[in-house]
Every structure is written in structure tokens, then in C-alpha cells.
Image (tube, helix red, strand yellow):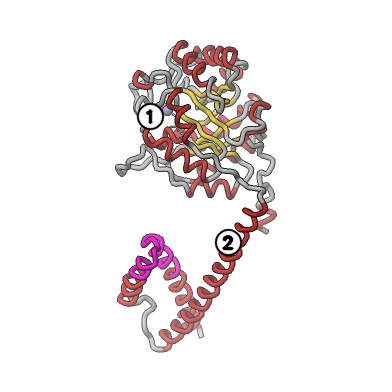
Amino acid sequence: MRQILNMNNYNDILSIQNWFPQLNDKNNILIAGPCSAETEEQVLNTAIAISKIPEAEIFRAGIWKPRTRPGSFEGVGEIGLEWLKKVKEKTGLLTCVEVATVEHIKLCKEHKDSVDILWIGARTTVNPFSVQELADVLLNCNKPIMIKNPVNPDLNLWIGAIERIYKSGIKKIAAVHRGFSAFEPSKLRNIPKWEIPIELKIQFPDLSIINDPSHIAGKPEYIAEIAQYALDLNMNGLMIETHINPKAALSDAKQQITPKELSELLKKLEYRLPENDNPNFNNNLEQFRYKIDSIDHQILELLSYRMDIVENIAKYKAENNVSILQLKRWREIISNRLKFADEHNLDKDFVKTLLELVHTESIKKQKRIFNLKKES
Ligand code: PEP
Ligand code: MN
């Protein structure tokens, strides 16, 4: 049944390397450019400096800027498309721009030699009405599209946007991970919540995911660490905000870096291989994996054994008319297991979550048995 419902596994989504011939042999795609296009000179000077970095293939610049609060710089608009055309002519870089309305897409289509790739920003992905409107006009625009995660940590909203675009017939789709906003103070501007892009990759193995460390970091000093983490997770590329003079930037001035800083940052990053064909390495990896498989089976066998005991306890409690939840016992379990976890170099939060999960399942099981007893 699940198979039938799940007929479309999206395996015809084209990875970003297959969008343009110049990206074919790139393991990691680098997208760089300013948060916003401000003047022709700023755009061209930034692009020329970026084009000298061998890894750089795609130039980004926002020309319609959806700012969180009104009154800040909202982008130069259509004129920016003329500047992007000059970037292409002068540097050979591919270009990409954010679109948020049907009108934006129409203008990108009219200026067909200005923009190669479009992206949907975090504040648009969040709204299925807006995404659907864009999806309805994107197909005849014939440009690849990147979809940033929504501002809130909701994987389904992100997937929903990807599905809407896919359903309109577009196969050149990638996701951009730019982190999630939170009200609580945090050292980062947006919390990465890496588990969300990881889950996205599990559900859409053929979808390229680009990491945007600039919007996660909010400050230049954290960009390298986040970018490295993304590469370690085998993400397919980076989008890094780069400005010829960050201090004077009209948007996101605090997080942009210069092309020179970008070039230095790239030198420090270590690129990981998704796989390695060295037989020795694979042999060793396989040995580790055998151990993990064996341990997982033992964990599951023990869990099953534990649940059998839970069943016996439930029957015993029901016969003696004792309630399921015994708070005192639960508190003892938590404190004693967390002490044990600590002594065994296990993260306490992780162990607590695991125990709570097991406890919830035990209670569910006990309830079932209590109900059966009641019916009999
Ligand atoms: C941007 O890329 O400059 C931007 C506005 O990003 P986001 O949609 O991720 O906030
Ligand atoms: Mn920005």
C-alpha cells in the first residue's frame, strides 16, 4: 500500500552538477556574491573578484529584498537584471537571483540572458499559497530553481514547497539550507538544526542540498566552521555572501566577507569524498559496519526482552489493581540511568530522550494489557 502511495520517489530530480556543462565535474558547487545588488559598480567589482577564485561558478545577488521589517533597503529591482547580464558577459559566471512573486519571474523571463538560476527565499517557502503561485508560472520560465528552507524548522513545509515545484514539471531543483530562526538568543543568527537537511536528503536522495553558512552564522567568524560541517555531511555546495566592501553593504553587512576572505576560507576547508574506492579503506569500513550491525541487533533484542518483561509487569499490576504509572520508580530510573550514562561517556540529554521514548512505549503497552483485562 505504502509503495503505491509513494509511487513517485522523485528520482528524476536532476542534481545541480547536471544543470549546466560547466558544473559537470564539480563535486562541490560554490555560489558567491553579495546579499544585494546595490550599484552596477559594486556588482561588477564583486563579480570580477569572485570569478578569479577557481572554485566559484555561480554569482548570487538579490535584487528584490524581502526584509523582515519595512524601512530597510528593499533592493534595486529590474535594473539589477541588466547588471547581472554584464556579470555573465564579463566573467562567464552563471547567475542566480531570488524571486518572490509572479512579477519577478516574468521579469527574469523577459531578461532571459541575465539570470540562469532562480531561488525561492526562506520567507516565501513558508507560504504554500505563494509557492503555488510561483510553481504555476515557473515551468514556462525554463530555469532551474533552488528552494531555501522555511524560516521555521518545519521539514514538511520545505518538502511541500519542493513538491509543488516538482509537480509543475520542473526537474532541475535543489534545496538551500540557511538555518531556522528562534526567539531565544543564540550565538548564530539562525539555528542550523542539521537533522532537518539530513532527513530531507534521506527522503530525496537525488536532490542537491546547498548550505548557506552566511545566513546561519550572521557573522564572518562562524562561516568556516559551519561550511566545514556541511561538507562533512556531504552537502553538495555552499552559498556564501561576498561583497567587495562588506562594511558599506546595504543589507546583511554584518555577515558578508570580501572575495579575498572567501578565497582564504576556501583554502582552509577540507573536502570530503562521498565514497572512496581504496579496497583497504572499504574493507576496514565494512568491519566497523559489521560491529555496528551486530550491536544494533543486540540493542533491539534487549529492547524486545525488556518489553516482554513490561508485559509481565502489566499483567501483574492489573491483577493486583495497581496503577500503570509509578512516578517514584520513574524518577529513580532517570536519575540512576543518567548517572550511568555519564560514567559511560554518553550524552545525558541523548540518554534521557531515549529513556523517555522507551517509557512512553512501555506505558502504551501496559495500557493495552489493562484494557484487555478490563474487557475479559
Ligand atoms: C538572502 O539570501 O539574502 C536572503 C534574503 O536569504 P533568506 O531567504 O535565507 O533569508
Ligand atoms: Mn542576505
Does 36 appear above or below 132?
above
Amino acid type indicated by mark 2: Phe
Percent x, y of residue 51 = 54, 20
Q: Main secondary structure of the magenta part?
A: helix
Q: Which residue is mark 1?
A: 255
Amino acid type indicated by mark 1: Gln
Residue drawn 42% across the image and 26% down it: 261
**Disc 1 residue lies near ligand 2 with CB under 8 A:** yes
Percent x, y of residue 338 = 35, 68
The answer to if 285 sits in the magenta stretch is no
| Quarter of the image where one finds residue 325 | bottom left
The residue at the far bottom in this view is 320
Distance in Å between CA atoms under marks 1 and 2:
41 Å
Does 241 appear above or below 280?
above
| Sequence-wise first label, 1 or 2 | 1
State the extent of the magenta-drawn residues as a range: 338-358
Q: Is residue 289 left or right of residue 321?
A: right
Please name whichever residue, 268 or 357, is drawn nearer the observer in this view of the structure: 268
Does 15 appear above or below 328?
above
Q: Which residue is mark 2?
A: 288
